[in-house]
Amino acid sequence: MKANREYKSTLFSKLFSDTDNLRELYNAIADTDYGKDTPVEISTLEDVLFKGIKNDISFTIDNRFVVLLEHQSTVSNNMPLRCLMYIARIYEKITNDDAIYGRTLLKIPTPEIIVLYNGAEPFPSEQTLKLSDAYLALDESQSKFGSLELTVRVVNINPGFNDVLFQKSKTLSGYTALIEHLMGLNPTKKTLSNAIKETTKWGLSQNILSTFLTEHGSEVFNMLMAEYSLERDLEVRDEEHRAAMAELTAEKDAEIAELVELTADKDAKIAEQAALIEQLKSEAKG
C-alpha cells in the first residue's frame, strides 16, 4: 500500500494520538466507560482524507474499529463515499490475504465513523450522513438483493453544542477552548503567527493543556501555522473559483441574451417577408 507522506499533522491528530486522550474522547462520544485496562490500538493510514491535512485517527477498541475525524470547513455530503474508500484500505491492512479466501467466516471489528465538526458555518447539534443517499437507483430491489450502507455520525463540538462531551473529556474541552480563543482573535495571514503565540500563552496561563503545550510548544506553533494557512489558502481558492464561475455564467447569459435577440430579429424579418408575400399574392389576384 503506497502511503502519501505529503501531509501535515494537525493539533487535533497530534493531541489525540495519545491513547489515554483517545480513550477518554471515545468514552465521551460513545457514552462508554473504558478504563486504562482496555487497550487502544491506533491504525491510522498515512493517506489523507482532506487536502494536505492529516486530521484523522483510526483505532480499534473492544472489537470496534473507529475512524475519527476533525473537520473545520463545510461538511461534504461525499464524506460517506470517501470514508468507505478509507475504511476499505484499513480492512485490507488488518486482514490476512489467505484467510479472506477461506470458508471460515472471518470476523472483523465493527466500524464506527465519527466526524467532530467545529467550523464557522451553522450546523445542527448532530447529523447522520448515509452512503445510500448517493445511490442513483434506490428502490425496493435494494431490500431484495442486498445493498451496501455506510453511515457517518457528525457531531458539532462548537461551544453551546454537546457540552456534555467537554465534561467527560477535558482534553477535548481544552482543545476546543484553544481553537475558539484563536478564532476569536480573527487572525489574518499576516497576524496568524502572533495570534498563535498569544493563544499558547493564554492556554498556559489558564492551565489549559498546559503540559502538552509546554512539551510541544514549537510543534504546536508549526502545526497551527500550517493548518490555518492552508485553510485560508483553500478559502481564497474557493472564492476565486466562485468569482470565475460567476463571471463565466454572466458571459454565457450575455451570449444567450444576444442569441435570443438575434433570433427575435430573424423571426420578425421572416414574419415581415411572409406578410409582404401575402400582400403581393392578394394584389395579384385583384
Image (cartoon, helix red, strand yellow):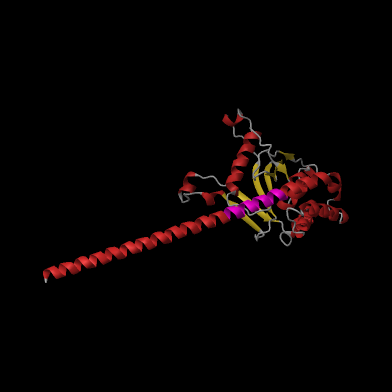
- From the viewer's perspective, is 250 left or right of 278? right
Residue closest to the far left: 286
Residue name at image x 76 percent, y 57 percent: 180
Residue 101 screen position, x and y as percent: 57, 30
Left of 121 or right of it: where is 274? left
Q: Nearer the viewer, residue 46 or 283?
A: 283
Q: Is residue 241 magenta?
A: yes
Q: Quadrant of the N terminus?
A: top right
Which percent across, then down, holds residue 225? 75, 48
Query: How far across and how far down the image is residue 227, in percent?
Result: 72, 48
Q: Position of residue 205 (x, y in %)?
A: 88, 55
Region in magenta: 228-242
| Residue at point 82%, 52% (across, down) | 197
Disc tally is: 0
Q: Is residue 115 visible?
A: no
Of 50 and 90, nearer the camera is 50
Quarter of image, res 122: bottom right
Residue 53 within the magenta-colored segment of the rendering = no
